[in-house]
Amino acid sequence: MALRTGEDRRKAARVKFRISDKLEIRYKFLSHMEEFQCPTVFSGGVLNLSKGGALFVGPIPGPEWLPQLGQGLVLIGLNILVPDREKPLKVLSSLRWCRPAPPGFSKFGSGPHYELGVRFEQLEGAHETALQKFLIGHQLRTNKYRKSDAFDAGAL
């Protein structure tokens, strides 16, 4: 069996978003460690999204948090603010990778900004269904829809 690398490792296709699409995310860092508690709810912008994870840009409490995030000792609670949906999609996620964000993302608050690639660890049934419908709808509106995406989502 060959090892899968890079993009091939993904279980679900990622749907790209531009900051101008205004798909916002609110998130909070969750930890049992006393020295890594942060009551702040941060805001960011989604760059890509799938049924299994997301890439978004936003601030973090500080660079000293990165080792704990990378080891899975601090999780990230996400609220994805989907247009035309009254309540946000709630997801528990873990950091898979990050890097400093390019300039121009200061609209998401102060502090260091990073591109944060996360894997969804917990996504409840109704939220998962709403996410799949949103992704397919966005692809149809932007002409980026492939039949295989609907098949993967169970729509066909």
Image (cartoon, rainbow, N blue to C red):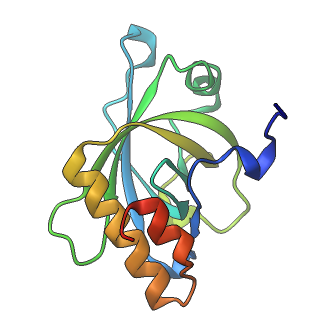
Seen from the viewer's position, the closer of residues 119 and 45 is 119
- Which quarter of the rendering shows the N terminus? top right
Residue at point 20%, 71% (across, down): 85
Q: Is residue 65 above or below residue 115?
A: above
- Which quarter of the rendering shows the C terminus? bottom left
Q: Residue 103, how many percent across, how many down?
A: 71, 64
Query: Looking at the image, can residue 113 be seen?
Result: no
Q: Residue 62, how many percent across, how many down?
A: 58, 33
Seen from the viewer's position, the closer of residues 14 and 93 is 14
Residue at point 64%, 31% (across, down): 63
Q: Is residue 141 above or below residue 134?
A: below
Q: Is residue 74 left or right of residue 85?
A: right
Q: Residue 138, how many percent across, how many down?
A: 43, 80
Residue at point 47%, 66% (across, down): 151
Residue 37 found in image quarter? top left
Q: Is residue 22 above or below residue 11?
A: below
Residue at point 55%, 70% (across, down): 148
Query: Looking at the image, can residue 49 be seen?
Result: yes
Q: Residue 102, how many percent across, how many down?
A: 73, 61
